Image (cartoon, helix red, strand yellow):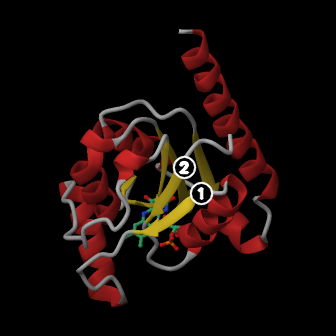
Amino acid sequence: MSDHRVLVVFFSRTGTTRMLASTLARMLSADLEEICDLAERRGPFAYLRCLVDSWRKRPAEIVPAGLDAAQYDLVVVGTPVWAGSASAPVRAYLLENRSKFRQVAFFCSFGGLGSQAAFAEMRALAGKAPVAQCNVRAAEVRRGAVGALLVLFVSALKRHLADHEALEWTC
Ligand SMILES: Cc1cc2nc3c(=O)[nH]c(=O)nc-3n(C[C@H](O)[C@H](O)[C@H](O)COP(=O)(O)O)c2cc1C
């Protein structure tokens, strides 16, 4: 595992996905990159913009990624769920970087509805099936009750990387 390079990339409007992303990066000894959105996402009009972007499946304008996804064995991408979709900045990131991914995994924070549809969209945008995915309710993040779930997710990722390495050695 220590030889593998892992990148955790995320967008967060109000901090929930950020909290998950930084915990995951620590657990995976991964690099961490936050997607920077050029649109204003605060306030009631901005909330509406998030909704419209989601309904139209519109990618946001984002600052180009600082870290090169092609340099990583696994890129773990996290988003909040917006109207049963991936957030617009994550949509843009996946579209802009899809040719660079070797392996991907997904996580999201959400209120309770629409995570599977968001994951399906992310899979289509990335052009790859994720090696694992993990949805976490925002209320559980606020209660600090996500430890066991993240341990399971990280174990699945580490197992996958180890198996993949074993396959490469036997080829
Ligand atoms: C515009 C918008 C739409 C949302 N739509 C959904 C939704 O369809 N389903 C859901 O469970 N939560 C929805 N949420 C709640 C967020 O997914 C949830 O609060 C998430 O944890 C926020 O993550 P963040 O703090 O990283 O921005 C929505 C939030 C926003 C701002």
Specify whether 101 is left or right of 144.
left
Q: Is residue 117 left or right of residue 39?
A: right
Q: Which one is in front, 83 or 144?
A: 144
Residue receiving disc 2: 6
Residue 37 falls in which quadrant of the image?
bottom left
**Residue 139 in view (yes/no):** yes
Q: Check mark 1 vs ligand 1: CB closer than 8 Å? yes or no.
A: no
- Residue pointed to by mark 1: 30
Amino acid on which disc 2 is placed: Val
Q: CA distance from mark 1 to mark 2?
A: 5 Å
Q: Residue at x 36, y 32 (%)?
A: 128
The image position of residue 145, as x and y in percent, is: 80, 63
Q: Residue 48: x, y in percent?
A: 27, 77
- On the image, the x and y values in percent for residue 73 come to 49, 40
Q: Are marks 1 and 2 in contact (CB under 8 Å)?
A: yes
Residue at image coords 40%, 35%:
102
Q: Identity of the amino acid at label 1?
A: Ala
Q: How many numbered badges does the structure rendering display?
A: 2
Which quadrant: the N terminus? top right
Residue at position x 30%, y 57% from top? 93
Q: Residues within 10 Å of mark 2 (few under 14, many from 20)?
A: many
Q: Is residue 110 visible?
A: no
Q: Residue at x 81, y 51 (%)?
A: 148
Question: Does residue 158 sit above or below 163 in this rendering?
Answer: below
As drawn, the label of residue 65 is: none
